Image (cartoon, helix red, strand yellow):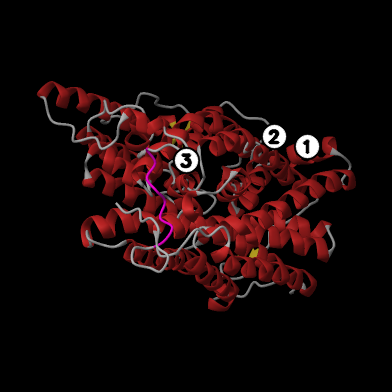
Amino acid sequence: MTNWVELVVFLVLFLVVTVLGFLAARWQRGGHMEHLDEWGLGGRKFGSWVTWFLVGGDLYTAYTFVAVPALLFSSGALGFYALPYTVVLYPLVFLPVLRMWSVSRVHGYVTPADFVRGRYGSSLLALIVAITGIVATMPYIALQLVGLEAVLRTMGINASGILGHLPLLIAFVILAVYTYQSGLRAPALIAFVKDILIYAVILVAVLYLPAKLGGWASIFDSAQAKLSQPSATSGGKPQGSILLTGSNQLQYITLALGSALALFLYPHSVTGVLASRGRAVLKRNMVALPAYSLLLGLLALLGYVAIAAGVKPVTNNATGRPDANTIIPALFDSQFGSLFAGIAFAAIGIGALVPAAIMSIAAANLWTRNVYKEYLHRSATPRQEARQAKLASLVVKFGAVAFILFIDPQFSIDLQLIGGVIILQTLPAVAIALYTRWLHRWALLAGWVVGMTYGMYLLSIIPNPATGRRHFGGSALTLDKLTILGWHPFAGSPVQIYVGFVALVVNLVVAVVVTWLLRAAGVFNGPDQTAPADYHADEGSPRLKPVADAVAGAPGAKVVASE
């Protein structure tokens, strides 16, 4: 049954961000929008506050807000992997993102694949990085829709068939239109509203709900009692535990580290970095962004709060199965009044729009610069590039909607886990290349092929008892299934490990070995467009390539940056 108060509050706040999305086209505008510097990177001039909200809104998504506490609700302590992951993330990327910003501003790079193209003089390697980024991003966008649908379903919009998805389609049509017009400025401006709402909702929830439910001791006792009960999907074993067990500690460590290494390889993360004004802005953000980890930790605990409150997931009328992603929306619906619950639902819903917009823009930039211009239209003007990117962003958005319409959303979740394994295979070509060209470009390709193939094979043998899927059921592999040319080095071990970490190690080993062989044979490693000083250039440096204020030939044109 539809809760009209919640729905009206949700729609009013959604209308506010829609208006902001359209107004953003003129916010901090430096010139004509028909250029990737302006449309796809916001003019490359966002300051500390805008960058903080933009990158935070990009990395901490709607799916994060529903999935992390849902994982604690169903499995317990393993769900806390998101905390060490975000804690170690920022020290790991502090220096690499500075180097990426500098070299990209010097040469006008828009995507990580642009950097690879310039670093190794290899259009093929750049194409591989671009396609990898697009493929890994698509299910990530789809998962934002999963978070948005969980909110709509909790409010009572839970029909089967196409009618059940109609509100989602309308929301994404609106998102597509204002992103097409305003580019990156739209999610950057909306991120302010999203984060303020999220912080307010979570802080109220973690103060009010424990007091209402008997305190944290009672909540943890309830969680342990529920998780210790056996279930059919766990083979008669306990569902989980509020403490890590001997079999999932290695998985916890490798998943946290692998996720940290992967996050800033995603194209949308790089887009947020390249949109900032200078290295000082990025330094301040890498120091301040861990504040979101505090928010994430408080949010994760709501999974245990939901257990203590006796919350049950809402049944998806389209599939007839309970939707685990509705746990937090259902908690807010049952424990708060309709007005506050509506605000909370709007926060999660808006939290889906911000990252979805940034991700679609990043994927569109990859297509435009590293496929369209490199292989289909080498003489494309900045105006043609911008128009191609706008059209590509529409295709990406509606491709993500197709995931929800035609594929079981649970499979989209599994695909996102697979996406992390996929994007990790670009680490040697992107992150390591920021420091050294010792790895040969052909060795990087060989490492990518072997790492990707082995990673996909390992993922294909992982079942998911909860959904009945025999293949691609997750990203946690028991060591006894780990094979090396038919050899089982850990036969009989129940310990689990993150597949992405294993595949990355194999990738690096192959890249190193093949590099030694190619260097011994004297094979040319391609031309390097960059210079050592390029990686340290800062705001105001004469080395920086001018940002396009307008398109060549347009009234008032000043400077055009094209590649």
142 or 95, which is in the foreground? 95
Q: Secondary structure at mark 3?
A: loop
Query: Is 545 a magenta residue?
Result: yes
Task: Please name which of the two marks, 1 or 3, marks the residue nearer to the observer.
Answer: 3
Residue 482 shows up from this direction: no
| Residue shown at 71% from the left, 61% from the top | 345
- Label 2, label 3: how many angstroms apart (C-alpha)? 30 Å
Q: Which residues are magenta?
A: 543-550
N-terminal of the pair, mark 2 or mark 3, is: 2
Picture disc at residue 220: 1
What is the quadrant of residue 518 in the picture? top left
Q: Secondary structure at mark 2?
A: loop
What is the quadrant of residue 516 in the picture? top left
Picture disc at residue 242: 2
Picture disc at residue 264: 3
Task: Say what amino acid the circle numbered 1 marks.
Answer: Phe
Q: Residue 192 location in percent, x, y? A: 66, 54
Say whether marks 2 and 3 touch (CB < 8 Å): no
Say whether marks 2 and 1 touch (CB < 8 Å): yes
For label 1, the crowd category at 10 Å Cα-Cα, with few meaning under 14, some 14 to 19 and many 20 or more, is some
Left of 378 or right of it: where is 426? right
- Label 2, label 1: how many angstroms apart (C-alpha)? 8 Å
Q: Is residue 135 above or below residue 535?
A: below
Q: Residue 66 location in percent, x, y? A: 64, 52
419 or 309, which is in the foreground? 419
Task: Say what amino acid the circle numbered 3 marks.
Answer: Phe
Q: Main secondary structure of the magenta part?
A: loop
